[in-house]
């Protein structure tokens, strides 16, 4: 269909009309699109939370121990949510950066 619209030279006009036809609530109620959009939103929220946790943990580590080494930076960037939670608790009692990442 998009090929046909492109060939007719009206795809931009059609896309503009579509933008005004549907609201996000309409899409979320759709039996096909709704579940897919909700999955993407959930994943995006999870990624946002993890990015925030990494940023806070990096700040705490750097305040306490100084700038992260490239290896520590890589571990932090590739950490799971469980790792981030464990390390956040460990920073309270750790004497070194290495102890945080144990």
Image (cartoon, rainbow, N blue to C red):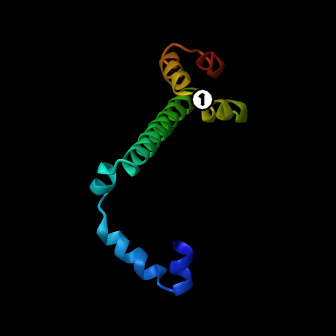
Residue 28 position in % (x across, y down): 32, 50
101, 40: nearer the viewer: 40
Rendered view: 49 above or below 33: above
Which structural element holds mark 1? loop
Residue 14 position in % (x across, y down): 41, 78
Task: Tell me which residue sits at (65%, 35%) in the image.
Answer: 73
Rendered view: 9 above or below 51: below
Residue 55 position in % (x across, y down): 50, 38
Quadrant of image for the C terminus: top right
The quarter of the displayed image where residue 18 is located = bottom left
Residue 99 position in % (x across, y down): 62, 15
Q: What residue is disc 1 on? A: 79
Task: Tell me which residue sits at (40%, 51%) in the image.
Answer: 33
Q: Is residue 72 left or right of 46 when viewed as pictured?
A: right
Task: Tell me which residue sits at (47%, 84%) in the image.
Answer: 10
27, 59: nearer the viewer: 27
Determine the residue located farthest toward the right in the rendered image: 71
Rendered view: 70 above or below 13: above
Mark 1 neighbour class, 10 Å CA radius: few under 14, some 14 to 19, many 20 or more:
some
Rendered view: 65 above or below 1: above
Q: Is residue 17 left or right of 70 when viewed as pictured?
A: left
16, 43: nearer the viewer: 16
Q: Is residue 61 left or right of 40 when viewed as pictured?
A: right
51, 44: nearer the viewer: 44
Q: Is residue 88 left or right of 101 when viewed as pictured?
A: left
């Amino acid at each position: 269909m998009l090929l046909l619209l492109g060939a007719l030279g009206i795809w931009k006009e059609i896309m503009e009309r579509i933008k005004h036809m549907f609201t996000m609530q309409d899409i979320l109620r759709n039996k096909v699109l709704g579940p897919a959009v909700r999955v993407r939103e959930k994943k995006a929220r999870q990624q946002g939370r993890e990015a925030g946790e990494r940023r806070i943990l990096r700040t705490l580590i750097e305040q306490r121990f100084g700038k992260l080494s490239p290896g520590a930076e890589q571990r932090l960037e590739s950490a799971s949510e469980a790792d981030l939670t464990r390390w956040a608790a460990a920073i309270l009692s750790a004497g070194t950066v290495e102890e945080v990442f144990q």
